[in-house]
Image (spheres, coloured by chain):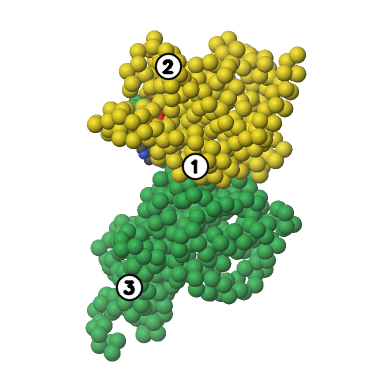
Chain colours: A green, B yellow
Amino acid sequence: MSLNKTLVDMNYLLKEAPREQHFITGAQAMAEAVKRASCDMAIAYPITPQSEVMHLVGDIYAQGHIKEYYRAEEELGTMSAIAGAARGGVRMFTATSGPGLLRGLEAIVSWPGHRIPCVLGVLTRVVNAPLSIQPDNIEMAYLMHSGIVMLHAENQQDTFDMTLAAFAITEKVDVYIPVSVSTEGFFVTHAKGYVDMMSDELAFTECDPYKAPVPAMDNEVPPARIQRDAPVQKSNFMSYLIHSVWQQEIWDCNKRAMKYIYEYLDGPIEVTNPNAKVMLVASGCAAAQAREANRYAEEEGLDVGFVKVRAIRPFPTDELNAALAGAECVIVPEHNIIGWLSKEVKAAIPNGGIVVEGPRVYGGMTLPVELIMTEIYDALGMDSLVLQA
Amino acid sequence: MSLNYMIPASKFKRYLPKDYVELVDYGPFGKEYSEVGTKNMGKYKELVEEHPMCSGCWMAYYIKIIFAALPNPEDTVTIGTAGCGRLAISQAAVPFIYGNYGDQNAMASGITRAFRLRFPDKQKDVITIAGDGGMMDIGFSMTMHAWFRGEKFTTIMLDNEVYGNTGGQESGMSVRGAVLKMSPKGKNFGKMPAMQLAITAGCVYVVKMSPTNINKAAKAIRRAIFAARELGPTFIHAYTSCNIEYSIPTPDVFRDAKEKEKGRFAFEEFMTDEAKELFTVVEAKKKKKVS
Ligand SMILES: Cc1ncc(C[n+]2csc(CCOP(=O)(O)OP(=O)(O)O)c2C)c(N)n1
Ligand code: SF4
């Protein structure tokens, strides 16, 4: 590093280094994390609401915190170049939103299989028509089956901590697949919140490509990636086998990320009042609203609990089962039309029928706490209209 | 370092396959081009071993020339893509990266920059090798923008004027009127002007050729690599017929390549003044060494 930083391990950085409170946007929080990550190179392509993040990352490149940065031709070019550079043995970052994520998706879904360690910011935005730049996290659904590790930040503080942790998790020898950090566009990226940050004179230990389980393609060590792919491309049993064992390993890598999510981020879920009759389960910004609804319910003396889901992949199936064991009803508020989280929760617990699929808002709408309260009253057999009046 | 991993420990050597030992002993790794190069093709086990391309495929032949011509095989990374070529490129004793169809020049932009960060004092050559569809159709934007950005690597287009690997569809490089799959009434626009596009986009060295002369083909490849190291992007547009899709009987493949050389693949070489100067220096040095 040209700026004479003190390099420290991620545990020290996240848990021990003294922190000071700042009042910053989510975009700033993500860029501030990148600044402390000893990131070698970032590749940018603009899209609202992500652009702010990569502008700021550009600034920290200009200040010398990152060694290389450029604006690519479009997102497929961006994500492909990330795959090239990571194979060259450097630590990589990029970020995108909605349509940009989908444009880059062919490359992104091949990152895990190519064993590309990198961090991807996903600042959520509407996809599909009518086109809009507003927050809606439906694009995360497309990432869920890619093998990539997925964290979902509730606020600016999460965005900072998760982005930093992601840089460590992606390079773990028993993980070594990309890690995405999603948060809602505008609601988090363009709004300010309090973020406790360590000094920017501290930075995460530099990338060592020779510690990798799948070393860099740099001609310094024998290549170990899928390089002789010709047999894979044939239609014979060997090719089926090679693909299947490789993919099994990717999903095992994904599962193995869980222990680092415990190590750096206190686990994949946060639980309040676990034995309640009605449980709220939410991630990202919806978790902030569910948290608020939970507070209202507490004030009203209702038997309600709350689970915030931090990790979407690996999905915290065991943890949710434990937290929801006593629930009679599970309400899953979301910022998308398809309800990807409620479907996951439903599939994860043995009594999926208790899951209420909603409330949901999309297209950029905010999620009023009252919407969640209505579901709570319904679940408790209370007349919500009378109560609210 | 890379040479070290190629070369087996002396005690282990006798247990290795003969082919491998020959490749190390007589092949081009760590040797002067004048000692090995194209003139030795066939004497040692070639860099490209058996490949599953069609018998008589001219593309497979040209790929062998590419590998024999490499100035620095022990520190070279090749990047290919979907298409026939990678079936042979992936069989070479040189690290090969295969991503998604058409992404080769974006991938190369990333890895070239990474190498320059990590090895500022060491030459690592990056070469993309892809078909006409991969380079000029699906990968067009990534090809062009890597050139516009001045990325320092070599791009080689294996132009067989068709999508060979997927069974003979029209490509942007097929000629006007060609009746192919997906152009059942004949292609209704001409070949894309790849060479002019490369020059316009800032390539410092560009060659269009039908590689009928091994040494001439190797010289162009080497020039492209030398210029990419120092000056900027370079591009080779080579005719590598698809004898299957164009129904060229194997014994006639060479004759066809000769014919094309008289027509739309007549040898053309473009270089900037800086590239010209560079070649004078590099090629003079090599001559000295030989003498
Ligand atoms: C995204 C995507 N689209 C389409 C394909 C299918 N595909 C594979 S190879 C190929 C054509 C190859 O033609 P060309 O690039 O000219 O190379 P050739 O096989 O002729 O050498 C196509 C269309 C693919 N693999 N990926
Ligand atoms: S289909 Fe054509 S280009 Fe492909 S291997 Fe066969 S002859 Fe060569």
Q: Which residue is mark 1?
A: B144
Q: Which residue is mark 2?
A: B259
Q: Is B90 left, or right, of A14 in this rendering? A: left
The answer for how far apart the CA atoms under marks 3 and 2 are is 80 Å
Q: Which amino acid, by three-letter code, is at mark 3?
A: Val
Q: Is A86 left, or right, of B194 in this rendering? A: right
Res B180 visible: no
Picture quadrant where residue A17 is located = bottom right
| Rendered position, B6 above or below A148 | above
Mark 3 and mark 2 on one chain: no
| Disc assigned to residue A278 | 3
The answer for how far apart the CA atoms under marks 2 and 1 are is 29 Å
Tell me the subunit letter for badge 1: B
Q: Which class describes the residues within 10 Å of circle 2: few (<14), some (14-19), or many (20+)?
A: some
The nearer-to-camera label among 3 and 1 is: 1
Q: Which amino acid, by three-letter code, is at mark 2?
A: Glu
Mark 2 and mark 1 on one chain: yes
Residue at image point 72% right, 57% down: A3
